[in-house]
Structures are given as C-alpha cells and as structure tokens.
Image: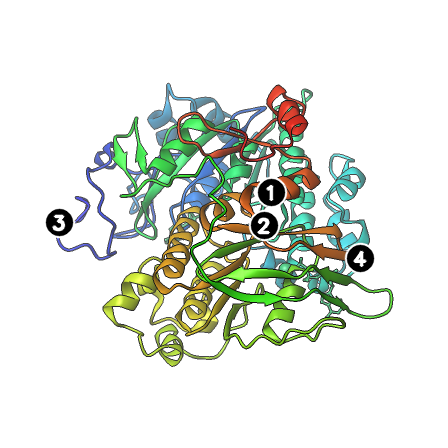
Amino acid sequence: TCGICVEKCPFDAIEIINLPQELNEDPVHRYGDNAFALYGLPVPEPGKVTGILGPNGIGKSTAVKALAGEITPNLGIYDEDPNWDAVLDRFRGTELQNYINKLIADDITVARKPQYVDQIPKQFSGNTRELLEHTDERGVLDELIDRLNIRPVMDQDIDSISGGELQRVAIAACLARDADFYFLDEITPYLDIGQRMTAARLIQELAADEESDRSMLVVEHDLAILDLLADTLHVAYGEPGAFGVITPPKSVRNGINEYLKGYLTNENMRIRQEAITFEEHAPRESFTGQPLVEYPSLSKSYGEGEFSLDVEGGLIYESEVLGIVGPNGIGKSTLAKLFTGALEPDEGSVDFELDISYKPQYIEIDQPMRVDAFLSTITDEFGSSYWNTEVANPLQLNRIMEQNLTDLSGGERQRVAIAACLSQDADLYLLDEPSAHLDVEQRVQATTAIRRYAENHDATVMVIDHDIYMIDLLADRLMVFDGEPAHHGHATPPQGMRDGMNEFLADLDITFRRDERTGRPRINKPESQKDQSQKRSGEYYYSV
Ligand code: ADP
Ligand code: ADP
Ligand code: MG
C-alpha cells in the first residue's frame, strides 16, 4: 500500500515509497466521503506562464475551478458549507494570498480552453466565424486568425473541420478574450510542431503584455513544448481518481528533470520506479536486422489539382522502429494507407506480402462491446501473464476492461487501440499518432510498451508522431516528410536519426540543445548563440 489506505489498495496503486507530507495535512478540497481529494493549488502569477505537469484525473480541473471561484474549496470538510475566509486563512502568508484576496473581491475574470476540443461541435452549431465573433474582447482576433492559420476555414461549419483546425480555433477563442486568468488545458493535441510553437508563442506574448497583469496556467503533456512555454512549473502526482498533489512551483528545468528522473527532490517523493533517459548521441547506423522489405518509389494524387504525394523508395529492416515526422497535411496518413493497401498508388506498386497491423490516426472502435471482449477477439494471448506484462499493464488497461468501447474517453480509446494493434500477429506494426490524448505518464508507458514489444518480437514498427520526446525515445531511424501541406508532399527514404533530425528541423528552423544534467533535448531560443552556431554547423539535434 502507499500508506494512505490501511487495507489493500483499491486502486492498484503503484508503489509510493513514502507518504507525501501534504497528505498529513487536510486537503484543499475533497468531493465527499472516500471521494477524490486535492492537495495543493497552482499559483497563478501575473505576467507569467505557469505550467502543470502530471497525469489526468489528478485534480487539475478541480484546482482551476477553485482558482476561477466556481467552487469554494472545503479544506476537506465536505459536510459543512465552505467559505472563502477559511481558505484565505489557510493560504495566508503564501504566494496565493494576493490571488485569493482578489478572487474574494470578485475581481478575477477567467478565459478557458477546454481539454477535449472534439466536444465543441456537440455544444456549438454554426461556422468558425460565428464561433469566434463573440470572443474578440481585445480587438486582436484578426491577428490570431492569421497567425494560427484559421482563415481558410472561417466559413466552414465547426462540425466539419479537422481536429487540428478545431484546436487552433479553440486556442484563438480563449486568447481573444480579455481576462485576468487564462487556463489552457493542453494546447498540442492534433497540432504539428510548427503549430505547437506558434500557439506557445502567442500564450507567452499575451502573458508578457505590459499593459495588463494576466496570468496563464497551462496543462501540457508535450514536454518539449511545456519546457519552451512555461516560466514556472508545478508537478502533479498521486493516484488518478483517488487523490492528487500539486507541488509548490519549481523551475521549469528542475520540474521536468525531476519528473523524468521519477523523483521529486523537495518533496522527497518517488513517483516512478524507473528514470526516463535520452540518448545524447545518434544511435549507430548499423543494423543487425535483416531487411524486411524494399519498397519502390510511389506516387499518389487524390485527383486533378488536389493533394499529391511522392515517396522515394527505401528499405525497412526487421526489428527496427522507424519514426515518421512531418507537418500536418503532408501525406503521412496517405502513406500509411498506401502501405496497408487501403489506397492504390498511381505510380509504383505496393506488392509486398506483409501482414500489417495498423492503428489509424482517428480511431473508430465503437462497437457496443466491452474492452475485454473486444481484445479477446484479437488475440488468444488475452489475459495470459505474458500479455498482461507486455501489453495490458503498461497501457493501464486493467481499470477499463469492463467498460464499453462506446463509453471510453479519448485517452482510454487510444490505449485500447494501441493494445489491439500490438496484439495482432504481424510483420509490420504501423501506429499513426499514438501520443494523441495520452497524458505524459501514459506516453512514457506506451513508449516503453511499443519499444519492448519491438525488441521482444523482432517486430518492425513504424510510428507517426509530433511529440519529439516520444520520437526520440522510440525511433532507430527516421522517415521525413516535407513539401507544401495540403498541396504536395515528399517522403525521404528511412535515414539515420542524425541526418533525419537535421533534415526535419532545418525545415522548421528549430535547433535543440541538451540539458546538462539529464541529456534531454531542449528547444533553443531562436537567434541564441547555440541556435546560431548549431545552424551554421548543420547540427540541429545531436549537437555534441
Ligand atoms: P484532471 O483535470 O486532473 O483530469 P479533475 O479535477 O477533472 O482531474 O478530476 C479529479 C478527480 O475528481 C476525478 O477522479 C474526478 O472523477 C473527480 N471529480 C471531479 N469532479 C467531481 C465532483 N463534482 N464530484 C465528485 N468527484 C469529482
Ligand atoms: P497527414 O497525415 O500528413 O496530416 P494526410 O495524408 O492525412 O496528411 O493528408 C494529406 C492531404 O491530403 C491533406 O491536405 C488532406 O486534406 C488530403 N486528403 C486526405 N485524404 C483525402 C481524400 N480522400 N481525398 C482528397 N484529399 C484528401
Ligand atoms: Mg495524419
């Protein structure tokens, strides 16, 4: 047990070595008897971007509701009427005192970007223009529309635009408001790296606006973007659904490093058994594997004047993990469909006899069936201790086995789909954007599961993703897409990580340095000395 429950842990909790000090105190809020309890609150700071790093279900939305004044924290006493004076007493002398004073004086307005943008079309009918026109409280909407590249979909119905477009519209709608406190619950889902950087920059600019005292709070699971975006960071940990602890603010660098290490120094708290480590040097380009398949150059166009894709022929090895990177709308999913045979190329032919197990980008598993029933139709191994260790446990499926596929959240559906993909017998596993909807801890575990699976099965895996940390941890080699999104795409043959990253990042004009302590990649400030010298030497990623 983790020390919180006296008897056997009802949550299958990972081993928490010592009881967090915060848990000896009363929580900030508890929903009821034996219900979720939140310890600690994030501190919004005027002029700053505050980040929160941690899993879903840990109380982030609860904390924001408190900071927005929508719920009055009950300090753990859920059977009496809560009041703000008690809360103020509790936080007197802390960094939150000023904020709470203002909140009590009814002085704080809040703008919010919801986590699941997919839900927006269910709540709003009309086109993009109609959705945005009521939000323009600062008179900056036109600029936001241009910088987020929303103009092409202004007259399109909200229920017909893509996930990435919806995400950008939702970010614009939030940032256009005139508020004191902005809360953005994940900005990166469905966005490519260039779009993620743009969104991050807009948030920073709004915080830095000298004529106002706005504070920004951002939850983000893409660590490279979080690192770039936030000024200070709260790590959140605990047991999703049971309790959550939000640490006092840390420096962003330390917060992420401690998170990756799995140990929070000030809190003296182990949050994971194993550290996550990065390779500072590109892996050697020698492969012990045999060639799996050599494919010819391919081309495909969706019709006269529509998107066209050219793929250079190449060689894929057995038991390698091939990362696939490139902007949105450049043909990555189209290539996946050419490989699986769902699409026929116009030139070249895909005649390899490979069994391919494919996880598409947009997952449609909506049969009225339980998760366990569904997965047992896919593999005879279902429920074996081997399958549990390799697939079910790292993907945290145990808690959702009895749920219906139709009731799953985005992240739950993603984990079931990854499990289904890996559970098939195949020569090649192709995963299109497995990080989407996963929180940071689930990304780490999914990465480990995919990597281990490839190693133990001599399986070849192709992974399309925009999360650089995930690609770094997963891939042996890279396939890079470039071109002009929505018009024309071009795919290189698989190449080594160093060459692939250089080609990909040169296109984006981004360089990475290494964190001195952990070796993790960090995006350089544009025009900084490191940025300039790395660009001169052509080393965009493996700079040492
Ligand atoms: P996060 O934003 O980190 O995903 P939330 O703050 O939304 O987490 O939820 C944390 C936990 O609190 C969840 O287990 C959720 O089911 C529970 N919870 C949220 N709202 C209520 C409520 N009104 N009553 C009881 N439990 C709730
Ligand atoms: P990516 O996966 O890199 O985001 P896709 O391969 O999904 O890109 O799409 C590339 C381009 O082709 C996009 O502009 C998309 O709108 C277009 N496209 C995709 N499928 C079709 C289709 N069936 N008919 C016409 N255009 C399509
Ligand atoms: Mg795609």
Give the camera-side residue of 321 and 247. 321
Asked where in the image residue 346 lies, by quadrant, the reply is bottom right
Rounded to the nearest whole Å, what is the CA distance between mark 3 and mark 2? Answer: 54 Å
Q: Nearer the viewer, mark 2 or mark 4?
A: 2
Badge 3 element: loop
Sequence-first disc among 2 and 4 = 4
Q: Nearer the viewer, mark 3 or mark 2?
A: 2
Q: Residue at x 40, y 49 (%)?
A: 444
Sequence-first disc among 3 and 2 = 3
Indicate the amino acid at tag 3.
Val
Q: Is mark 4 within 8 Å of ligand 2?
A: yes
Badge 4 element: loop
Residue 495, label in figure: 2
Q: Is residue 433 above or below residue 89?
A: below
Decide: few, some or many residues near mark 1? Use Cα within 10 Å; few <14, some 14-19, many ≥20.
some
Rounded to the nearest whole Å, what is the CA distance between mark 1 and mark 3? Answer: 54 Å
Q: Is residue 537 above or below residue 430?
A: above
Rounded to the nearest whole Å, what is the CA distance between mark 2 and mark 4? Answer: 24 Å
Q: Are marks 3 and 2 in contact (CB under 8 Å)?
A: no
Rounded to the nearest whole Å, what is the CA distance between mark 4 and mark 1? Answer: 25 Å
Q: Are marks 2 and 1 in contact (CB under 8 Å)?
A: yes
Residue 87, label in figure: none
Q: Is mark 3 within 8 Å of ligand 1?
A: no
Q: Nearer the viewer, mark 1 or mark 3?
A: 1
Indicate the amino acid at tag 1.
Asp
Residue occupied by mark 4: 487
Q: Residue at x 62, y 36 (%)?
A: 200
Residue occupied by mark 3: 6
